[in-house]
Image (tube, coloured by chain):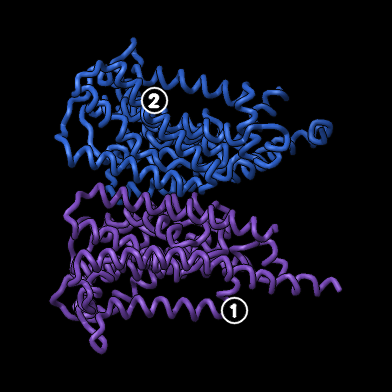
């Protein structure tokens, strides 16, 4: 009797979420579509796989950092150290000095490992020592920035050649940046379908209920923080490849931008709602705004103002839609 | 004696912040004699006051359960807009008043967005920060920059009354006022109530929205004032002048023993946090640390400081009390322990 109650409640949660999510996704998709149409009407030459590939390439570091942020936000946290993990991976990738040969591919593996390690450290501070996510990552943010500066004191370095080759390569005529965007999305859909994916949402929606249902909240969070570290690291590695050099101070700009992207996409900062799919759309939307402003030869302030306004409009719009839905449900 | 003990115990979080600051200061004084000199202490007080101004509003906002990310842009706004107004022929004192008032209005908009539109504080203040940044960029891109900072701001930042810098005295005044308001006034009590549980506060008749809006308004005004003083000290203005203060204003509040979830904290704690951060950043270069090492130690000390102020002081307090209680018991007086 008593054991049937929680199992009966679970499906209701599962049904309610996709409905709200679809509102969010539709809104984000509509904004993205509008921006795509505007951009295409300003510069028709963009309707070309190579050009789109270049656009996605500029977006990719932000995309990966935002994916990391999304994962953390989904379990009810926030990560200020994504920028730090980004630059450490970025620095590790470019410390190969060229010439000597050797197994420089290993640098990428090292950058992956370092990313996972840093994310796991955040997770340990949060789950083990009981730090608030905001504060734990506030501390590790400067620590990771310092580590990046230790590895690479100034801008420069060279990424392994195969990474630069990867940037310009194509798969059946499709630039690798687009392929990667699709792979990230598919990987997320696969993860979402697994039991672990379900647990991420369960923990984010209601930690106590997840615990009562037998989920190890700590283990899920730890895994999510580690995974987020990996994603932020991939962003840093990608940026090193795209710029063909490293920048140990580039991370800070991405921190608050990634939060903005997550919110524009439609993932709730309360956790348990949203996902990586909408974040990808949000990141592309911000990138398109910059592209449009560049194409029109407008000043930088226009793109900053437009990004901030988009953030406000999306959040305010969503609050209105949610209030409407709540009213309809009450009726 | 007992009263003093309980008074300290109630403030162990704040006390541990001051202790951390004192330990760092002593390390500096031992390592290099010039560290404890009057001129260096004055210098550190001035630097700490910039953090203190930005962190005053942040303290109120965080106690009420919010967060203000507009800080760096409002710091920059304070200096840039003041210089612009002064270059346009406005007398300095009204110009400062006007700039601070605009800062308050920006804070007010933050508060309205957070309370009435129910936008998450992080998002609302991030977006407002973006809009202020866009305005400053527009000023820089559309008009000539390099306006002079008015002399009044420069005097405010660099003059002294006897041995004390003017800014430090002003900061002390604000700290005393904030301390009294937080612990003695109805506003203070309501503020903690809102942060601890806004539903309960609302049910007991507190105007939750008004309290929240006030905290953001004060934060906007104080941060902009901090920007004015900072510009006066530096002598010029630039867009990134407020950059470090987002991090330090939040870190000072947290090291001072406030919970990021709201409902606890005090401005005197934040003062300790601001002093700790300032002593730390002038201490680390003495050890020939590179910029990189400095950042790493900075982050570690912040985590330790937060840990001390939140959970660590309770642990240390328990150990300390156990140490005191043991001889007491052996002397046969169990009364004090059970009480």
SS category of the residue bearing label 2:
helix
Where residue A101 sits: x, y (%)? 17, 80
How many labels were placed on the picture? 2
| Quadrant of residue A165 within the rendered picture | bottom left
- Residue at the image point whose x is 56% and y is 80% from the top: A194
**Image quadrant in which the C terminus of chain B is located:** top right
Left or right of B241, for residue B129: right
Q: Would you call the spot at circle 1 few (<14 residues within 10 Å), some (14-19), or many (20 or more)?
A: few
Where residue A85 sits: x, y (%)? 37, 61
Host chain of mark 1? A
Q: Is A175 located above or below residue B23 in the figure?
A: below
Q: Would you call the spot at circle 2 few (<14 residues within 10 Å), some (14-19), or many (20 or more)?
A: some
Given residues A131 and A283, the one toward you in this image is A283
Residue placed under numbered mark 2 in the picture: B101
> What shade has chain B been given?
blue
Where residue A55 sits: x, y (%)? 25, 69
Q: Residue furthest top?
A: B162
Left or right of A288, for residue B100: right
Q: Is B44 located above or below residue A240 in the figure?
A: above
Residue A280 at least partly seen: yes
| Quadrant of residue A13 within the rendered picture | bottom right
> What shade has chain A been given?
purple
Host chain of mark 2? B
- Residue at the image point whose x is 86% and y is 74% from the top: A1
Q: CA distance from mark 1 to mark 2?
A: 54 Å
**Image quadrant in which the N terminus of chain B is located:** top right
Residue A195 numbered tag: 1
- Residue at the image point whose x is 18% and y is 25% from the top: B148
Where residue B32 sits: x, y (%)? 31, 32
């Amino acid at each position: 009797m008593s054991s049937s109650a929680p199992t009966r409640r679970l499906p209701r949660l599962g049904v309610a979420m996709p409905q709200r999510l679809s509102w969010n996704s539709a809104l984000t998709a509509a904004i993205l579509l509008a921006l795509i149409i505007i951009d295409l009407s300003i510069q028709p030459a963009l309707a070309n796989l190579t050009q789109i590939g270049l656009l996605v390439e500029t977006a990719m570091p932000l995309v990966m950092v935002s994916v990391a942020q999304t994962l953390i936000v989904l379990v009810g946290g926030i990560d200020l150290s994504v920028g730090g993990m980004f630059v450490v991976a970025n620095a590790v990738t470019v410390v190969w000095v060229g010439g000597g040969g050797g197994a420089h591919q290993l640098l990428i593996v090292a950058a992956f490992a370092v990313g996972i390690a840093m994310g796991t450290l955040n997770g340990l501070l949060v789950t083990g020592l009981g730090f608030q996510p905001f504060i734990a990552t506030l501390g590790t943010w400067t620590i990771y920035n310092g580590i990046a500066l230790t590895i690479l004191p100034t801008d420069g370095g060279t990424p392994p050649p195969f990474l630069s080759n990867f940037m310009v390569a194509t798969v059946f005529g499709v630039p690798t940046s687009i392929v990667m965007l699709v792979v990230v999305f598919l990987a997320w859909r696969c993860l979402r379908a697994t039991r672990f994916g379900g647990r991420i949402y369960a923990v984010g929606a209601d930690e106590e209920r997840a615990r009562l249902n037998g989920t190890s909240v700590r283990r899920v969070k730890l895994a999510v923080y580690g995974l987020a570290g990996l994603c932020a690291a991939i962003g840093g590695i990608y940026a090193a490849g795209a710029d063909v050099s490293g920048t140990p101070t580039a991370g800070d700009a991405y921190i608050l931008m990634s939060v903005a992207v997550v919110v524009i996409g439609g993932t709730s900062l309360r956790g348990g709602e949203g996902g990586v799919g909408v974040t990808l759309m949000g990141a592309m939307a911000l990138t398109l705004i910059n592209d449009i402003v560049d194409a029109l030869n407008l000043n930088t302030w226009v793109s900053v103002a437009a990004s901030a306004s988009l953030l406000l409009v999306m959040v305010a719009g969503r609050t209105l839609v949610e209030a409407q839905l709540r009213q309809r449900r009450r009726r | 004696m007992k009263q003093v003990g309980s008074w300290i115990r109630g403030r162990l979080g704040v006390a541990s912040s001051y202790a951390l600051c004192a330990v760092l200061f002593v390390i500096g004084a031992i390592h290099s004699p010039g560290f404890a000199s009057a001129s260096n202490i004055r210098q550190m007080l001035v630097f700490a006051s910039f953090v203190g101004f930005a962190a005053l509003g942040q303290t109120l906002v965080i106690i009420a359960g919010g967060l203000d990310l507009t800080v760096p842009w409002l710091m920059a706004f304070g200096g840039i807009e003041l210089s612009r107004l002064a270059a346009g022929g406005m007398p300095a004192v009204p110009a400062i008043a006007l700039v601070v008032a605009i800062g308050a209005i920006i804070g007010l908009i933050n508060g309205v967005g957070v309370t009435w539109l129910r936008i998450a504080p992080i998002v609302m203040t991030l977006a407002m920060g973006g809009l202020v940044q866009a305005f400053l960029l527009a000023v820089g891109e559309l008009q000539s920059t390099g306006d002079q900072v008015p002399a009044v701001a420069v005097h405010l930042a660099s003059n002294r009354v006897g041995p004390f810098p003017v800014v430090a005295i002003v900061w002390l005044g604000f700290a005393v006022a904030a301390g009294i308001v937080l612990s003695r006034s109805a506003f203070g009590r309501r503020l903690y109530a809102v942060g601890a549980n806004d539903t309960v506060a609302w049910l007991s008749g507190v105007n939750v929205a008004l309290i929240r809006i006030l905290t953001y308004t004060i934060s906007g005004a104080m941060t902009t004032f901090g920007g004015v003083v900072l510009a006066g000290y530096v002598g010029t203005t630039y867009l990134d002048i407020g950059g470090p203060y987002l991090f330090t204003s939040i870190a000072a509040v947290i090291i001072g023993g406030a919970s990021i979830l709201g409902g606890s904290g005090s401005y005197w704690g934040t003062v300790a946090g601001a002093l700790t951060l300032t002593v730390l950043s002038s201490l680390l270069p003495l050890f020939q640390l590179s910029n990189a090492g400095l950042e790493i130690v900075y982050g570690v000390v912040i985590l330790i400081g937060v840990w001390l102020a939140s959970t660590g002081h309770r642990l240390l307090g328990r150990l300390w009390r156990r140490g005191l209680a043991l001889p007491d018991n052996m002397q046969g007086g169990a009364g004090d322990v059970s009480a």
